[in-house]
Amino acid sequence: MIFPYRTIISEALDGKDFVLIVRPEVPVTFVGPSGAASYIGLVDTGSDHTILPKSIADELGIPVQPATGPPASVFGGQLVKLSIGEVVIKLKVVDSSCTWKATVFFHDFMKAVDETVIFGHTGFLDYFTAIFDGKLAELTLLPNDELPVVE
């Protein structure tokens, strides 16, 4: 499955201009007891875990419980508390798709504008051979035999 990188326009760090940024983001559908919803998430090789906004769990009726381990450490060393729950993830491109059940983490963001879907190793990347092609600005995901497929 090949996904073109998503292009966004951002203000340059000097604040005087704008730059194009490309990111390996993929569209997915999450399924829970109360329904399904589609989102775009960043595929992040630097993230140990897949982390979703808690609002997704609330919207889809996914039961969560506080994670019992240490808080997660995010960029800059900030610690955040996480909850844990199980969700069905559907990944689809024009000619191919796969669906699996994963245990993921949820974070209760302070503001809706800050909510981000992060696809890290557990729950996502561990199930694929991933090729990040910066030159072509595309991500290739090939399911491996660890993918817990749901029919």
Image: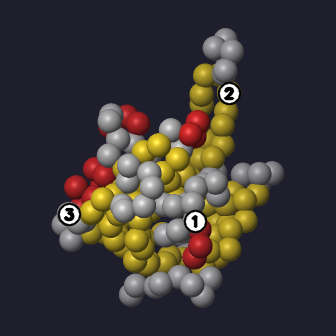
Q: Secondary structure at mark 1?
A: loop
Residue 98 higher or lower than 133, as above or below? below
Name the mark on residue 7.
Answer: none
- Pinpoint residue 150: horizontal percent, then vertical percent: 40, 85
Name the mark on residue 121.
Answer: 1
Q: For mark 1, does the 10 Å Cα neighbourhood hold few (<14), some (14 to 19), or many (20 or more) residues?
A: some
Sequence-first tag of 3 and 2: 2
Q: Nearer the viewer, mark 2 or mark 1?
A: 1
Number of marks in the rendered image: 3
Q: Find residue 9 and report its image quarter.
A: top right
Towards the viewer: 93 or 56: 56
Q: Is residue 15 left or right of residue 36?
A: right
Amino acid type at circle 1 is: His
Q: Nearer the viewer, mark 3 or mark 2?
A: 3
Q: Is residue 109 left or right of residue 143?
A: left
Q: CA distance from mark 3 to mark 2?
A: 39 Å
Name the residue: 39% across, 87% down. 151
Q: For mark 3, does the 10 Å Cα neighbourhood hold few (<14), some (14 to 19), or many (20 or more) residues?
A: some
Tell me if residue 21 can be seen: yes
Name the mark on residue 19.
Answer: 2
Q: Secondary structure at mark 3?
A: loop
Name the residue: 60% across, 79% down. 143
Q: In the rendered image, which residue does mark 3 sit on? A: 61
